[in-house]
Image (spheres, rainbow, N blue to C red):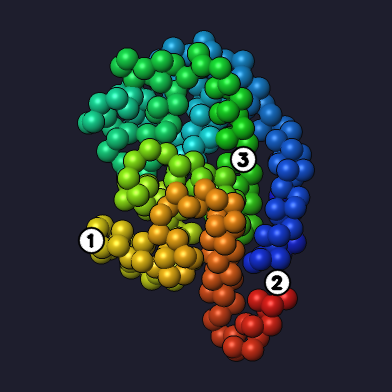
Amino acid sequence: MYQPVLISSGLAGWQFLQRTYDQQLSVFSQSTELKRDTDHFAEKIASVGTAEELVSDRQLLTVAMGAFGLSDDINNTFFIQKMLSDGTTADDALANRFSDSRYRDFSEAFGFGPGEIRGALKPGFVDDIIAKFQANSFEVETGNQDESMRIALYAERTLPDVVQGSGTDAAKWFSIMGQPPLRTLFETALGLPQAFGQIDIDQQLSVFQDRSERALGVSDPADFADPETLDRLVTTYLARSQLGQIGSGASGASIALTLLSS
């Protein structure tokens, strides 16, 4: 498996990764193991008509769940099958019970629920799932070297879709809070403590809005679809993350020098 090339952590490493991302992702996607899985998915998914058939094929499931960043759940086949079979049209469907919207997106995309159209029958479905799987897999491998880079890549790729969807500003903030990578990014960028997630959810919403306005000049989550605003958010996250990593035992001068060199 091709290993992503990172020259350093922090902002300098991020700038290099951004410049080389397309080339690195292209090489990564041709890795033998990855290509074997995506070729199998492209060949077989159109013939899969039920959730049970999907979960019974480990290779198909690897791509399907990896595309939505849900690979950690791959061994929970009963749970996955139930989620896919329920679909998303009913309020009490399993996928709709999670604050993490990735579960709903996963179930909705494959369309095995009552009254839904199978995703594999829709134009562009296979290419879209494979592209997401490749990007997510690259992010995972990047995270094995530097977790902050993985989170930054994930946010840059997915946050615009999250905030441009339908729904109220509050609903979009809740979607952000419900996805662990995005939540981590915002909590770090906004300087929120680890215990923040234990307070009342409505209070969390108010704090997110207030801190975002003060730190980034943005309270409407839809503004994060703007490339400049998104870049400001990610840069703030990486700077604070780097500061946290080097801050233990370091002097103020050495911290400043490190950040300036980035």
List x then y, in percent, for residue 23. 77, 43
Quarter of the picture containing the N terminus is top right
List x then y, in percent, for residue 120. 51, 17
Q: Nearer the viewer, mark 1 or mark 3?
A: 1
Residue beneath the point at 58% across and 41% down: 136
Task: For marks 2 and 1, give the CA distance.
Answer: 37 Å
Residue nearer the viewer, 74 or 114: 114
Marks 3 and 2: in contact by CB < 8 Å? no
The 10 Å Cα crowd at callout 2, few under 14, some 14 to 19, many 20 or more, is some
Residue beneath the point at 71% across and 54% down: 17
Task: Look at mark 3 in the image and give the residue it sits on.
Answer: 135
Task: Look at mark 1 in the image and give the residue it sits on.
Answer: 200
Residue beneath the point at 26% across and 63% down: 203
Quarter of the picture containing the C terminus is bottom right
List x then y, in percent, for residue 94. 28, 32
Question: What residue type is disc 1 on?
Answer: Asp
Task: Look at mark 2 in the image and give the residue it sits on.
Answer: 262
Disc marking residue 168? none
Question: What residue type is disc 3 on?
Answer: Ala
Q: Secondary structure at mark 1?
A: loop
Question: What residue type is disc 2 on?
Answer: Ser
Residue beneath the point at 42% across and 64% down: 212
